[in-house]
Image (cartoon, grey):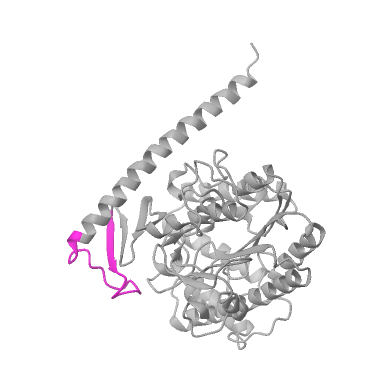
Amino acid sequence: MAKNNVILVTVDCLRADHLNCYGYERKTMPFIDYLSTQGVKFEKFFATGHNTCSTFPSIFASVYPLELTSWLPLPQDIVLVSEILRQKGVKTAAVHSNPYLSSFYGYNRGWDYFQDFLENENKHIKQFLVRKKLRNLIRKCTSERTQKSIRELHQCIKILCNLEQHPYELASTITNCALSWLNKNKDSQFFLWIHYMDAHEPYWIRIGDNFEQKYSRGLSRFSRISILRDNIRGSLRWKTVQRMIDVYDDKLRYIDANLKKLFDFLDEKKLLDNTYIIFTADHGQEFLEHGGLFHKASLYDEILHVPLILIGPDIEKYADKNLISQIDIAPTILDLFMLPLPKSYRGLSVLSTSIRKRKYVISEAVKSGYRTYAIRTEKWKLIYNPKRQELYDLERDPKETKNVKDEEKEEYKNLLAILNRHILWEEKIRIQRATILEKQRIIRKLRKIRF
């Protein structure tokens, strides 16, 4: 009997409602639309946070973002699914080009093969420290208005000088690297993680590999500079944002073409018979739906609602309507390998019957210095921090346009009670983690002392 393999594909900044299989009018990812009919499409899958740094600890270690004392570097006291699998003899590989998921930040734990395309790590560290010192110096020596002008000027010069250069590796490079590893390890039991960055901003950069653009075909160099100008000024017009959306949708088409290439390879090598594929995203992307752009500390559904599709041997074909969270990804991976969960994992396998009993999911962020939470049930969603509270009736108002906190006081009270218990639990976890980390620091210092 062949051993199971798992491939986890994550796409940066992919919101669910920009896929045709989730209701979008454009067919941005036709191959993914097809895959959604070949397995389970989870209709109510939500990110635990608003950015890469907050969501990937949830994806790989089944923890909530705000139970951690820090996101970068990756805390040493959480158990990554890659570490568990490697200990069990599974070949593990990771291919991506997101610097926040790099070896520099500790994401290389548990992988037999780890390619983050960070060729000169010392250079990256030096640039990081120089930027940090420069920011601190600017804060000390200039007014807030001058700081903003300096940041805008710096961004403008940097982007204009690199208008044709990508700040990440293109999907074709990521795919080819993954296929090369797969070809060498196809006879082993494996877990492969592939992360695509192409849907991430900036949206004034062309799509690579002479890919035929469909929605952004008329985006000239002048138009791209116009997008840049409006973005830096902070006075975005809807016409500018629509141009960004056109580029975003074409980038999704480009990723989709690469995924088709990946699946063709799996089919050719007869790996689909014993390989499970999980397709998802770390978070979504805002395009002014609630006044924000991209993914800055927002907990509306354009950020939180992301796709999740699971296909593989013996996986039924249906649309799942249970509430699913990113803390369920790592437990699902272990379940597919028929391995038990560590006690530290907060989530459940999406294939377990227990998940049907879940009544709510929670997402978290830090906004303007305040811990911010979103708790949602089938019908209601509460976004809470000490400065502002928003309650939405998702059945009547799925776009989250009308805050009904004052009209629905009983629902607000019930959700807040659940959330307060979660916040109190998290505070205890943070204290425990901080105590453990302090003990570890003391032990390291004592080891260096010569008596």
Q: Position of residue 253 (x, y in %)?
A: 62, 79
Compared to 438, does 394 lie above or below? below
Prevailing secondary structure of the magenta residues: loop
Q: Please state if 173 lies on the left or on the right of 288 as rendered.
A: right
Looking at the image, which residue sits at the far front? 1
Q: Residue at x 29, y 51 (%)?
A: 418
Q: Position of residue 288 (x, y in %)?
A: 42, 73
Q: Is residue 11 visible?
A: no
Foreground pick, 347 / 121: 347
Looking at the image, which residue sits at the far right? 184
Residue 94 inside the magenta-drawn segment: no
> Where is the N terminus found, in terms of image quarters?
bottom right
Looking at the image, which residue sits at the far bottom? 218
Q: Using the rendered view, name the quadrant where residue 238 is placed.
A: bottom left
The region drawn magenta spans: 387-410
Foreground pick, 155 / 284: 284
Question: Total of numbered circles in the picture?
Answer: 0
Foreground pick, 276 / 416: 276
Q: Using the rendered view, name the quadrant where residue 290 is placed.
A: bottom left
Q: Is residue 90 visible?
A: yes
Q: Residue at x 43, y 34 (%)?
A: 432
Q: Position of residue 213 (x, y in %)?
A: 64, 84
Compared to 151, does 424 lie above or below? above
Q: Residue at x 53, y 52 (%)?
A: 331
Residue 409 inside the magenta-drawn segment: yes
Compared to 75, does 251 lie above or below? below
Q: Position of residue 301 (x, y in %)?
A: 41, 68
> Where is the C terminus found, in terms of image quarters?
top right
